């Protein structure tokens, strides 16, 4: 019985190795489809990533306006966004 368990475990390990090798070969064989899927995922996620970065960078400015001038968060956020838009507009126009 002990020999049967060793053979069975060796067979399962070999079968798992063959299955992993087959999956890897299929991924390499269809690499264009695989990378197109990754590119589609990144294209769908890019607006969320950009929004996260903008919110992360502007949060200290909003917090400063809130604490220093005792403003509401919506007012300080609006002033911050208008300031950034104005700076971008002026830098593009000149």
Image: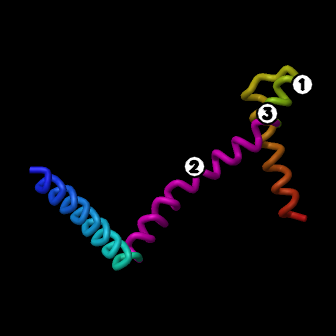
Q: Residue at left 25%, top 60%?
A: 13
Q: Residue furthest bottom?
A: 29
> SS at mark 3?
helix
Residue 58 in the image, given as x and y percentages of width and height: 76, 41
Residue 68 is labelled as: 1
Residue 78 is labelled as: none
Q: CA distance from mark 3 to mark 2?
A: 20 Å
Judging by the rendered image, the residue that carries numbered circle 2 is 48
- What's the magenta region? 32-60
Q: Residue furthest left?
A: 1
Q: Residue at left 28%, top 72%?
A: 22
Per the picture, the main secondary structure of the magenta-coloured stretch is helix
Judging by the rendered image, the residue that carries numbered circle 3 is 62
> SS at mark 2?
helix
Vertical arrangement, residue 28 with respect to residue 56, above or below: below
Q: CA distance from mark 1 to mark 3?
A: 10 Å
Q: Residue furthest front?
A: 2
> SS at mark 1?
helix
Tag 1 and tag 3, C-beta contact below 8 Å = no
- Specify few, some or many for label 3: CA neighbours under 10 Å numbering under 14, 14-19, or 20 or more: many
Viewport quadrant of the C terminus = bottom right
Occupied quadrant, residue 11: bottom left
Vertical arrangement, residue 53 with respect to residue 42, above or below: above
Residue 14 in the image, given as x and y percentages of width and height: 24, 65
- The residue nearer to you, when weighing 51 against 7, is 7
């Amino acid at each position: 019985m002990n020999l049967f368990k060793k053979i069975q475990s060796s067979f399962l390990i070999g079968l798992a190795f063959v299955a992993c090798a087959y999956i890897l070969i299929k991924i390499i064989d269809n690499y264009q489809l695989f990378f197109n899927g990754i590119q589609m995922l990144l294209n769908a996620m890019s607006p969320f990533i950009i929004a996260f970065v903008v919110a992360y960078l502007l949060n200290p400015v909003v917090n400063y306006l809130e604490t220093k001038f005792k403003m509401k968060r919506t007012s300080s956020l609006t002033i911050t966004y208008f300031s950034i838009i104005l700076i971008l507009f002026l830098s593009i126009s000149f």
